[in-house]
């Protein structure tokens, strides 16, 4: 059974930092693109960041560019999201996802096939 397990969420003051991790089990995703999404209360889930299979290409939502960094360690089957200069508007449940696509030819808008359960990030203002 394939599982994606997020960790690293919590409560942080505005301006602070958090690092989210997502470990996959049940299969290897070293050849697959991965992404982070978030859903705030009363809002639809939105794209945050994505990374291709090798880590050589990344994509970010405009709202997090320059503040968030996505990275991956294929040896650990793990993807990370470093979040700096957090704002109250970043408060949401954060989900990691894995695609059956490598993301090598196109990363933006690719479908994601596996999802984690989410981790809560709360930024106090």
Image: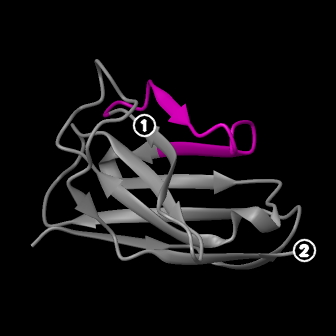
For the residues bearing labels 1 and 2, Cβ distance under 8 angstroms: no
Q: Residue 82, which numbered label?
A: none
Quadrant containing the C terminus is bottom right
Q: What element carries label 1?
A: strand
The answer to which of marks 1 and 2 sits earlier in the sequence is 1
Q: Which residue is the site of mark 2? A: 125
Q: Is residue 25 left or right of residue 96?
A: left
Q: In this view, does 21 lie to the left or right of 124?
A: left
Report the front residue among 119 and 82: 119
Residue 46 appears in the picture as rendered:
yes
Q: In which quarter of the image is residue 8?
A: bottom right
Q: In this view, does 104 lie to the left or right of 49?
A: left
Residue at x-position 57% and y-position 75%: 42
In percent of width and height, residue 23 lies at 35, 64
**Is residue 64 inside the magenta stretch?**
yes
Q: In which quarter of the image is residue 53?
A: top left
Where is 34 relative to 116, above or below? above
Q: Quadrant of residue 24?
A: bottom left
Q: Which residue is the site of mark 1? A: 51
Q: Residue most toward the front?
A: 42
Residue at x-position 24% and y-position 42%: 30
Judged by its main secondary structure, the magenta piece is loop
How far separated are the C-alphas under marks 1 and 2? Answer: 30 Å
Report the front residue among 6 and 73: 6
In percent of width and height, residue 15 lies at 89, 61
Residue at x-position 44% and y-position 45%: 72
Q: Give the range drawn in magenta.
A: 53-71
In percent of width and height, residue 110 lies at 30, 36
Quadrant containing the N terminus is bottom left
């Amino acid at each position: 059974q394939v599982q994606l397990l997020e960790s690293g969420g919590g409560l942080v003051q505005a301006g602070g930092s958090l690092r989210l991790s997502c470990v996959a089990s049940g299969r290897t995703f070293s050849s697959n693109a991965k992404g982070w999404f978030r859903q705030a209360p009363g809002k639809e889930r939105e794209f945050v960041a994505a990374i291709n299979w090798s880590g050589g290409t990344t994509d970010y939502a405009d709202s997090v560019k320059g503040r968030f960094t996505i990275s991956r360690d294929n040896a650990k089957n793990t993807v990370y999201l470093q979040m700096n200069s957090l704002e109250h508007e970043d408060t949401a449940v954060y989900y990691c996802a894995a695609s059956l696509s490598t993301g090598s030819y196109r990363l933006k808008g690719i479908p994601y096939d596996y999802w984690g359960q989410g981790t809560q990030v709360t930024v106090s203002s």
